[in-house]
Amino acid sequence: MRQSPSLQVELDGRPGSVRAARSATAGFLRELADRGEGRLGAHTREDAELVVAELIGNACRPAAGPCRLTVLVSPGGTVAVVVEDSSARLCRTPAGPGPPRLGLTVVPVLGQGVHVLRTGAGKMVTTTVPDR
């Protein structure tokens, strides 16, 4: 059985981490599309890049330490995004109207929910971006 294409990026959490994560994701998804793998449309790739930027930004603000990004592309064209960081502080969706804060307003709109799991070293935040 063939394994789903994946990308894993270790980030230090300093300024530039969001840009590096988004750039790595864009390059990875573009390469898959160019090879005809994963059946990813342009809108799906754009949504996944934005989700990555928001989740990495969220991880870098409170954690002030390293984080890991994993992007997995299913044969059906969905994109799973997993961000692990060293902060035990759980993410919360903003309570009221206003501009997005910490990415958790945008992520559930583009992804299929936001799932947060505490780990021994911090937390893991996941979502799946559907094909569109």
Image: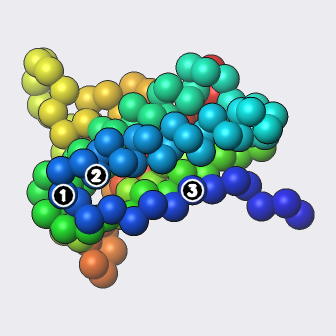
Residue 82 quadrant: bottom left
Residue closest to the far right: 1
Image quarter where the C terminus lies is: top right
The x and y percentages for residue 80 are: 55, 47
Image quarter where the N terminus lies is: bottom right
Check the image and report above or below for 7 versus 105: below
The x and y percentages for residue 62 are: 12, 57
Residue of label 1 = 14
What amino acid is found at the position of numbered circle 1 in the picture? Arg
Residue of label 2 = 17
C-alpha gap between disc 2 and disc 1: 6 Å
C-alpha gap between disc 3 and disc 2: 15 Å
Q: Which colour scheme is used?
A: rainbow
Dots 3, 1 in contact, CB < 8 A: no
Q: Is label 1 in a helix, a strand or a loop?
A: loop
What amino acid is found at the position of numbered circle 2 in the picture? Ser
Query: What residue is at 36 percent from the left and 48 percent from the top?
Result: 20
Dots 2, 1 in contact, CB < 8 A: yes
C-alpha gap between disc 3 and disc 1: 20 Å
Q: Is label 2 in a helix, a strand or a loop?
A: helix
Residue 54 quadrant: top left
Q: Label 1 neighbourhood size at 10 Å, few (<14), some (14-19), many (20+)?
A: few
Q: Label 3 neighbourhood size at 10 Å, few (<14), some (14-19), many (20+)?
A: some
The answer to whether one can see residue 8 in this image is: yes
**Residue 115: mark:** none
Residue of label 3 = 7
Along the viewing direction, whichever of 98 and 86 lies nearer the viewer: 86
